[in-house]
Image (tube, rainbow, N blue to C red):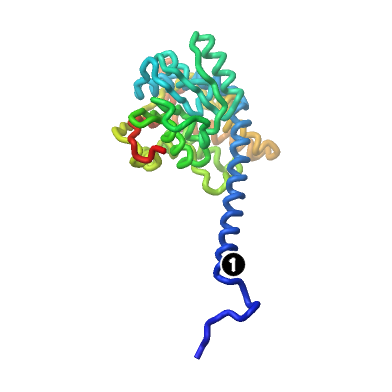
Amino acid sequence: MVRIGRRIGSGPTGEEQVDDVMTIIGGARTTQDAAVTALKEKHRAMWALGDYPALAAEVIAPLGPALVEAVGVRPGERVLDVAAGSGNAAVPAALAGGRVVASDLTPALLEAGRRAAEARGVALDWQEADAEALPFPAGAFDVVTSCVGVMFAPRHAVAAAELMRVCRPGGRVGLLAWTPGGFIGQLFATMKPYLPAPPPGVQPPPLWGDEAHVRGLLGDGVAEVRAERRVLTVDVFGTPEAFRDYFASHYGPTIAAYRAVADDPARAAALDDDLADLARRSARPGARGGLVLEWEYLLLTARRTEVGVS
């Protein structure tokens, strides 16, 4: 007969084993949280590189008004624009009569947005905030938007839960994000081999441009979901190299990719070639010369239901 038992001093009890496992899990979670916090600090610095406010004004300016129109901002409504950058959607929302709070992780972008809003004669509340831990009460806003912004939050489900939390029942959510297969999604795929790997659990930003992914994030907390793929036509770059050089000097993620290979001339040259090739493959000739690029994005709006409101 074989007896299964524990001799005195032979090993941990069941409770001790559970405690050990929980300690390991807790330690792993703490390590992951620390890695995500460190990544956010890098993001804060990254988006201050170059000149994103100029890019937003010169290249992607139509996106903000398109989102504001789609979500239907009305005069007097309380609007929160999350990861607002320099106000691509926040300023148009204020011009539509909304009482707008623009939140972003990067103070330099908020300051640029403040100056742009003042130049257009509108007042907004600009607040530094983490999209994964918004400093606002539940149900504080009638409308919650994000225009190619919240997609860069490391943990999609955490950020989506925050968007839902601060939107009142019956309120509206409007999201605009680059699609995975569109030009900017391909840009991130092109830069990926040149950048350090993100911490475990961090999801690619362009997934916010996948309708099924976003519907899954919002779940049964929304109704009347409307999603549409649209294209932003970009004709400001004369050559593939002009696109590459502009993004290498203006766009934080591209600048970060170049910095990551700064000590390796061969890899820097390969990145040069890959970015120019991406623009070359994706472009069609313009009527007056130069390039025409079509950047696909997903525009999704929904009404907040009462399910899951806390």
Q: In which quarter of the image is the C terminus?
A: top left
- Front-most of residues 257 and 125: 125
- Left or right? Give the position of 10 relative to 154: right
Tell me residue 30's x, y (percent): 60, 49
Query: Which amino acid, by three-letter code, is at mark 1?
Result: Glu
Q: In this view, does 243 lie above or below 12?
A: above
Tell me residue 154's x, y (percent): 53, 40
- Front-most of residues 178 and 175: 175
Picture quadrant of residue 71: top left
Residue that mark 1 sits on: 16
Identify the residue at image location x=57%, y=62%.
21
Label 1 environment density (alpha carbons within 10 Å; few <14, some 14–19, many ≥20): few
Seen as rendered, the residue at the extreme bottom is 1
Q: Is residue 24 above or below residue 16?
A: above
Picture quadrant of residue 229: top left
Q: Callout 1: helix, strand or loop?
A: helix
- Front-most of residues 47 and 261: 47
Picture quadrant of residue 64: top left
- Asked whether the viewer can see residue 294, the reply is no
Q: How many marks?
A: 1
Seen as rendered, the residue at the extreme right is 263
- Left or right? Give the position of 46 relative to 156: right
Identify the residue at image location x=64%, y=36%.
268
